[in-house]
Image (cartoon, rainbow, N blue to C red):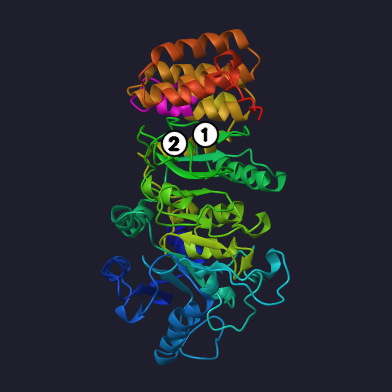
Amino acid sequence: MFRALLVVVLGCMSAWGLTPAQVVVVFNSESERSEQCARAYCAKRAISVKQCVGLRGLPKGQDITRQEFDTKVRYPLLLHARQNSWRLPVTPQQGFKPVAAMVLMPDIPLRVREEKEPGKKPGFHFQNCASVDSELMLLGANYPANGPLNNPFFEKDARLEDAKPPVLAVTRIDAPDNKTIRRMIQFPAEVERRGLWGWTVVDQGGPYPQGDAWFTTIARAAKEKGQPLFHEESKATLAPTFPLMQDTAVYFGWYAHPANGPFNPKTHADFHFAPGAVAVHLHSYSGTSVKSPDSWVGALLQRGAAVTAGNVYEPTLGGCLRFDIFYDRLLKGYTVAEAALMATPWLSWQGVVLGDPLYRPYEVLSRNGGDAGNLFVQWRQLILQTGGNRKGMVDSVHRQLAAPQGPRLMEMLAWHLAGLGELDEAAECFGQVARRAQSERNRVRPALLQATLAFVDKDERYGRQLMQRLLEETPRSPFRPAVQKTAETFMPELRPAPKPQSQPQKK
């Protein structure tokens, strides 16, 4: 008994790194909202008010000049650090209060603008625009403003306390509306007690094989950890109003702009992530504005995500947050701030991470915990017990099909079978789920996937039959755009005729 307890305790200690005492909270002292959010966050995470810093004279809006960044942000923070004996990662010989992370509250500028310099060489390696967040990761260091710098903590797998990298982990709490901001402060601390459970959605099929490889790695990691996986691999992103599962806990996708599919703010079919969700879409300009619901970061946060990330300017693919590393470190029990820092290749660059830096969504999973009554815990146990074996999985799920949660388990099984290449059997499982569904969302989705698999499995006749039936059943459904778009993909005759090009008039 003592040995088992010791293993659990040591397991928790090995993953725990960042503590509230190591986090600095920065707010705009001339914004009532910003100061209120700082107080609320400190109360939620038991952070001393002595670790809060209010900045004055900040320009309104999200952009700031390099000079304004230095005089209104960097220098005041350095002065405060010196006066309060903070030991910054860049200057470990100074101060005695270690600071490892920083979280920025609403109404702190987001972007340092590009400024022309006489004789500056062309090319992204010489541009001086960056996210404020990325610049603050080097607080206390002397470095050139032009171009990115390599992150010494990139790809590491270690606690900040042990590795002591010479960089700050920086995240931000902000969103398009106050309700979403309050949720970003409140939910993570509550969710991590029981763990983040739900579907993992991977929507790959982007323009570059290098990036697609990240998504393949994420999908593999989700399966290995027993997370139910929705894995879409076509070049198209999810269709408009696609009836995604409301208990989606993780989303990684690419490559579209602005926010589209079920996340588009103009989409009327309501979709909301599970509380505490981690959701990120890879695009060069995914984080150009935190305040706009048209940007990917804004759209995903408004749809309920607690954590997201983006780019304020073009980063190039090699300068983007490495989604696969980020997900891997979260699964291992690290905090959002630690995982993001390990997944960030370049500093003084374009990245921004939004979310509670202390949030550990998978601390419970990392020690193999979880409520036995939780459907997703049950699925994980089934995966671990059977090793993902087809027969064992099928037999177990079919025995539970009549139970209230049977159809949800069957949908997880359908995706599992599709991943094994058992497309015909997977399609049949989706059909059973659709027939037992209690809501339109949960009926249209598996029916749409059943028809899609029939087409993919070269059974065009059956696919057309299923799709035609679904079209007839959903004339006024909020999910009709997704049905129509998918039908047009496989049935070319349904596509709208191209508009005739106007002939140039003779003069």
Q: Position of residue 461 (x, y in %)?
A: 60, 7
Q: Which residues are magenta?
A: 396-411
Q: Main secondary structure of the magenta part?
A: helix
Kind of residue sitting beneath label 1? Leu
> Mark 1 and mark 2: span between their CA atoms?
7 Å
Badge 1 vs badge 2, beta-carbon distance below 8 Å: yes
The label on residue 182 is none
SS category of the residue bearing label 2: helix
The label on residue 238 is 1
Of pointers 1 and 2, the one earlier in the residue sequence: 1
**Location of the N terminus (image quadrant):** bottom left
The reply to whether residue 410 is visible in this rendering is no
The reply to whether residue 457 is visible in this rendering is yes
Residue visible at 51% across and 39% down in the picture: 201
User: In which quadrant of the rendered view does residue 418 lie?
Assistant: top right
SS category of the residue bearing label 1: loop
Q: Position of residue 435 (x, y in %)?
A: 40, 15
Q: Is residue 220 above or below residue 180?
A: above
**Left or right: 135, with 456 as reference point:** left
Q: Residues within 10 Å of mark 1 (few under 14, many from 20)?
A: many
Camera-side residue of 502 and 266: 502
Q: Residue furthest front?
A: 507
Residue 193 painted magenta: no
Q: Is residue 349 above or below residue 195?
A: below
Residue visible at 37% across and 48% down in the picture: 302
Camera-side residue of 156 and 444: 444
Kind of residue sitting beneath label 2? Pro
Residue visible at 61% across and 30% down in the picture: 419
Q: Position of residue 204 (x, y in %)?
A: 60, 39
Identify the residue under disc 2. Answer: 262
Q: Is residue 178 above or below residue 159?
A: above
